[in-house]
Image (cartoon, rainbow, N blue to C red):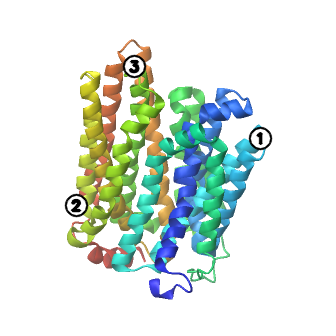
Amino acid sequence: MIGSINKISGSKLLVGIVLSILTYWLFAQSFLNIGPKIQETFGVSPEIVNISVSLTSFVTGVFMVVAGNVSDRFGKVKMTRIALILSIIGSLMLIVSGNVVLLLLGRVVQGFSAAIIMPATISIVNDFFDGDERQKSLSFWSIGAFGGTGLSSFFAGAMATFISWQSIFILSILLSLIALFLLKNLPESKRFDKQSSRFDYVGLTIFVIMIASISFVITQGYKLGWLSSPTLILSVIFVICIYAFYKVEKVKKIPFIDLKLFKNKSFVGAVVANCLLNTGVGVIALFNMYAQAGLAFSAFQAGLLTLPYLITLLLVVRLGEKSIKRFGAKRAMVIGPIVTAAGILLFSLTFFNTSIYVVVALTGAMFFGGGTGLFATPALSTAVSTTPAEKVGVASGIFKMGSTLGGAFGIAIMTSIFTGLTQSGQSVDAAASTGFIVGVCLVIGGVFTSACLIPTRKMKQVEKEQVAEVE
């Protein structure tokens, strides 16, 4: 709780946490917009650049739940410090030489760092803050994550253009060092379990194979072909692993993931709705493709058109937080995706001429960001507050893994629809419109998930009942 923090104020703790998560959402994610600069520096093929871009997110998604489980057992503060050191090492590997092997290894190390940081920092917030302070802290966590994502493309482009792409990661190292300093006197929040040494390595192995296979299908299936042999084989492996994981974990006394978590309707609803809302990342990717291919805008101009998304999101996040106390989480988790879907629908109106479409798109970006901001804190709060304290790390890992897989799925589906339709002879306008409408349908799925699974009662009532049920 906030009173138990020794020699560090709540505000310093929050700054340290936000700086920690920015190492992924702002800095590591900047690779999405500096591919050509990377290719020029390292003299490698576009395929290698594409691998380096996606590698960090892939590793993060695969190992996030694993890292959350380890944090629950061995200490969240300790794991956060380790993650920050890994972030520094990964950044150094990117900038100290022009060696492509170090480039790829650096991106892997950054992925491990992010996988640890996200569930560990959410757990720290849950352990050290109570009541309204916890909701406020989770809002700042969301601001760091969503704000970093929204700013990363513009930030990376500006840094790479006016200074150098390496300066991005020099700044990341400096902020990681500041975060380590701010967290240096933070006491360990973990209540150690005498049985924590009995780790479920079988469950861990099956889970990693399961998530790795589905992650590869989601991120690469549209390139290899959804009915290609590798895609089908990995899909079968995924299904087999689900069955094996259920059978193994069901009989374990200390399972890798306690399956009772999934009896918690609020937690499941938050995870699924969050996954579906995060498919909206594909909307940003598709909009950038359409703005450049269909409207003849530069990458910089396309990025400027999405800035209202970031600004509105940051303004609305605290509104979502405050709505929990007054109305409960469900209302914001239903209304938020509806507003987001309305924004995506405006993006789909590609039949307008360019000048009118720009106005419509700017309005759509505001709705898109506002809905996402309204949803962010209630969803995260629901996932954390309805989970027993000793399982918050793994629960946070599952929640954020849903974000990662949802974003990857959204990008894969929407961009493959756009590419496929344009290659089949459809106009760029029609192809983009179809992709956006698919995005609307995915986000509306989040509306129905929240409406059906999230209890209507206020969060404080839900917390007691859900925690008792899981325990």
Tell me the kind of residue under disc 1: Val
Q: Nearer the viewer, mark 2 or mark 1?
A: 1
Q: Looking at the image, which is closer to me, 17 or 188?
A: 17
Give the labeled residue for mark 3.
421
Q: Using the numbered discs, state the Cα–Cα distance from disc 1 to disc 3 in whole angstroms.
A: 37 Å
Rendered image quadrant of residue 270? bottom left
Q: Residue 123 in the image: x percent, y percent?
A: 50, 71
Q: Using the numbered discs, state the Cα–Cα distance from disc 2 to disc 3 in whole angstroms.
A: 37 Å
From the viewer's perspective, is 374 left or right of 89? left
Q: Looking at the image, which is closer to me, 364 or 197?
A: 364
Instruction: Give the mark nearer the N terminus: 2 vs 3.
Output: 2
Crowding at dot 3, Cα within 10 Å, few <14 / some 14-19 / many 20+, comes out as some
Would you say the residues marked 1 and 3 are in contact, meaning their CB atoms lie under 8 Å apart? no
Q: Is residue 446 above or below residue 199?
A: above
Tell me the kind of residue under disc 3: Leu
Give the labeled residue for mark 1.
101
Q: Looking at the image, which is closer to me, 400 or 242?
A: 400
Assign the C terminus to one quadrant of the image: bottom left
Would you say the residues marked 2 and 1 are in contact, meaning their CB atoms lie under 8 Å apart? no
Residue at coordinates 24% horizontally, 68% vertically from top-left? 328
Q: Residue 182 in the image: x percent, y percent?
A: 59, 73
Instruction: Give the mark nearer the N terminus: 2 vs 1.
Output: 1
Report whether residue 118 is seen: no
Give the labeled residue for mark 2.
331
Q: Secondary structure at mark 3?
A: helix
Q: How many marks?
A: 3
